Image: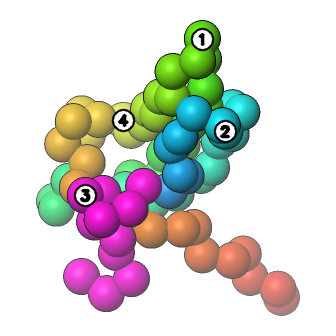
Amino acid sequence: MSGWIKCSDRLPLEVNGEVPFRSVEVIATDGTAVMQCTFDAGNGCGKPWATWNGYNNIPASQITHWQPLPSPPTE
């Protein structure tokens, strides 16, 4: 799968105790379906957390790979 990044290798945003809330739009897949979704990460109450949002028909626990959204066309 060219361009795809394994969730087990790296998540769209680094998750650690020092990161304030951030959000990024990505393309995600479970190996069958491909959807645009949002990956949110942050530090709430001293605990780092991360979650997938807007994953439509793919349960968050089933997302295996992701990639950044492509740049929009210029023309």
In the figure, is residue 70 to the left or right of 37?
A: right
Amino acid identity at mark 4: Asn
- The crowd level at tag 2 (other Cα within 10 Å; few <14, some 14-19, many 20+) is some
Disc number at residue 45?
A: 1
Indicate the secondary structure of the residue bearing disc 1.
loop
Q: Which residue is mark 2?
A: 19
* Residue 10 visible in rendering: yes
Identify the image quadrant of the N terminus: bottom left
- The crowd level at tag 4 (other Cα within 10 Å; few <14, some 14-19, many 20+) is few
- Quarter location, residue 27: bottom left
Q: State the extent of the magenta-drawn residues as a range.
A: 1-11
Q: Which residue is mark 4?
A: 56
Q: Main secondary structure of the magenta part?
A: loop
Evaluate if marks 4 and 2 touch, with contact meaning CB atoms under 8 Å apart.
no
Q: Earlier in the sequence, mark 3 or mark 4?
A: 3
Above or below for 30 versus 22: below
Name the spot of residue 69 as percent of width and height, x first: 57, 67
Disc number at residue 33?
A: none
Amino acid identity at mark 2: Val
Q: Earlier in the sequence, mark 4 or mark 2?
A: 2
Indicate the secondary structure of the residue bearing disc 4.
loop
Indicate the secondary structure of the residue bearing disc 3.
loop
* Residue 29 visible in rendering: no
Q: Earlier in the sequence, mark 4 or mark 1?
A: 1
Above or below for 28 versus 37: below
